[in-house]
Image (tube, rainbow, N blue to C red):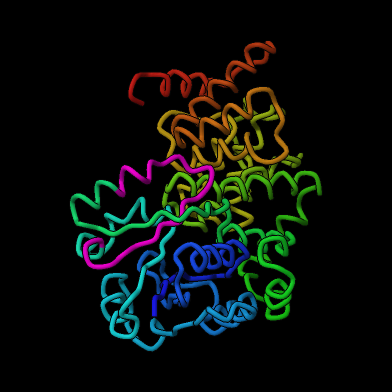
């Protein structure tokens, strides 16, 4: 019996997972697709929900696919971490004719995996490419085939740009996730109060800004989550979420309770400095990287962290932004990544201010000079 092994946290499972499972069955001509929910992924500290809840959602989503089987191998092995190489060797006894299915993002980073050379040599792989990702899969497949005698199939199906993290963060922000997970799974999530980790935090933010501003904040958060994943920045989701949701927290504030540079009061950049103070004093944020990203998300500055660049960029290219040049910046991000798109956006911002005869804060000019230097 030929079996496709498809592992993942499925936290939660979504409709794109289902399409991938159907494509594996149809394209690989397998008898079964075995779903392997991870108990503790090597690259994550813990799952957001219990193993049982995740399995229940998988059953709800895939109940009509008779060729699907759920294997609780990771739960029953009772080990802290399950590596793919070890897992496949153990499962090979149960499924002697298997093919291991992984996403394009995982494939791009497979050389960081435990005993990846032996994994490539010992087991056939199936790769799911993701749309909007620029990567030469075939060249890498040819390299591994020659170097490790790997047996790798590139699925014709192209996965959409959807992730479980994006869905859970959407749920944090009170967005309707039915389009991603379907009615039944969405109901299960709601009925069981799943993915409500930041409910009080988000509620506080929402109650302190206008509906219009909260919409922009929501769009910035979701854009930031996508940038982090698309560019493989490996910034913690919590850092991205907190920095983005609080980036404009002082945008509509008129009071000046906490100290900020006096020259910025009553200017368009006041809210970035005051927002950092509000985040610290009123939301108890002490993470310096997060505070720094909030503090300079409008002006930028020399030597920004990846998180700082991400917030600066997400604020200016998220859904709802329609200014001239925004599509060029989005395309630059897709093709060239964070640093290139950040620089393009910074230069656009500077050019816009100068073309309108507006004053440019010194930090912005310093940032433009810094990032336009060669190799920066």
Q: Which residues are magenta?
A: 120-141
The quarter of the displayed image where residue 204 is located: bottom right
Q: Quadrant of the N terminus?
A: bottom left
Q: Quadrant of residue 194?
A: bottom right
**Viewed as shown, does residue 278 lie left or right of 27?**
right
Residue 359 visible here: yes
In percent of the image, x 45 and y 44: which residue is there? 231
Q: Quadrant of the C terminus?
A: top left
Q: Residue at x 34, y 53 (%)?
A: 109
Q: Where is residue 101 drawn, in percent x and y?
A: 41, 65
Residue appearing at x 63%, y 23% in the figure: 325
**Residue in the foreground of this view, choosing between 199 and 348:** 348
> Would you say 324 lies left or right of 341 here?
right
From the viewer's side, name the closer residue of 42 and 290: 42
**Residue 127 part of the magenta segment:** yes
> Residue at position x 65%, y 33% from top?
270
Q: Position of residue 332 (x, y in %)?
A: 51, 30
Q: Nearer the viewer, residue 243 or 121?
A: 121
Where is 177 relative to 245, above or below?
below
Q: Is residue 203 in sight in this rendering?
A: no
Counting from the top left corner in percent of width and height, residue 4 is at 42, 71
């Amino acid at each position: 019996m030929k079996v496709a092994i498809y592992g993942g946290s499925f936290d939660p499972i979504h409709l794109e997972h289902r399409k991938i499972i159907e494509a594996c069955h149809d394209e690989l001509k397998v008898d079964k697709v075995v779903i392997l929910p991870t108990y503790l992924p090597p690259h994550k500290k813990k799952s957001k929900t219990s193993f049982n809840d995740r399995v229940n959602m998988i059953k709800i989503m895939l109940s009509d696919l008779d060729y699907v089987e759920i294997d609780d191998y990771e739960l029953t092995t009772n080990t802290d971490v399950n590596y793919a190489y070890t897992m496949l060797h153990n499962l090979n006894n149960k499924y002697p004719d298997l093919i291991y299915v992984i996403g394009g993002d995982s494939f791009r980073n497979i050389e960081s995996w435990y005993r990846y050379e032996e994994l490539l040599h010992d087991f056939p792989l199936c790769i799911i490419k993701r749309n909007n990702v620029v990567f030469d899969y075939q060249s890498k497949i040819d390299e591994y085939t020659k170097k490790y005698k790997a047996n790798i199939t590139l699925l014709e199906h192209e996965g959409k740009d959807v992730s479980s993290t994006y869905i859970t963060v959407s749920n944090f922000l009170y967005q309707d996730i039915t389009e991603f997970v379907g009615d039944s799974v969405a109901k299960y999530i709601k009925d069981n109060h799943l993915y409500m980790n930041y409910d009080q935090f988000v509620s506080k933010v929402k109650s302190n800004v206008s509906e219009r501003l909260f919409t922009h904040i929501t769009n910035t958060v979701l854009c930031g989550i996508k940038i982090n994943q698309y560019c493989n920045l490996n910034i913690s989701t919590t850092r991205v979420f907190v920095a983005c949701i609080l980036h404009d927290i002082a945008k509509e504030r008129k009071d000046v309770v906490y100290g900020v540079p006096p020259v910025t009061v009553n200017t368009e950049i006041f809210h970035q400095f005051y927002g950092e103070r509000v985040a610290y004093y009123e939301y108890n944020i002490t993470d310096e990287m997060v505070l720094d990203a909030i503090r300079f998300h409008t002006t930028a500055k020399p030597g920004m962290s990846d998180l700082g660049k991400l917030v600066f960029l997400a604020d200016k290219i998220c859904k709802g932004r329609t200014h001239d040049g925004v599509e060029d910046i989005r395309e630059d991000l897709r093709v060239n990544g964070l640093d290139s798109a950040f620089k393009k956006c910074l230069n656009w911002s500077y050019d816009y201010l100068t073309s309108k005869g507006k004053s440019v804060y010194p930090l912005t000019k310093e940032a433009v000079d810094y990032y336009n230097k060669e190799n920066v």
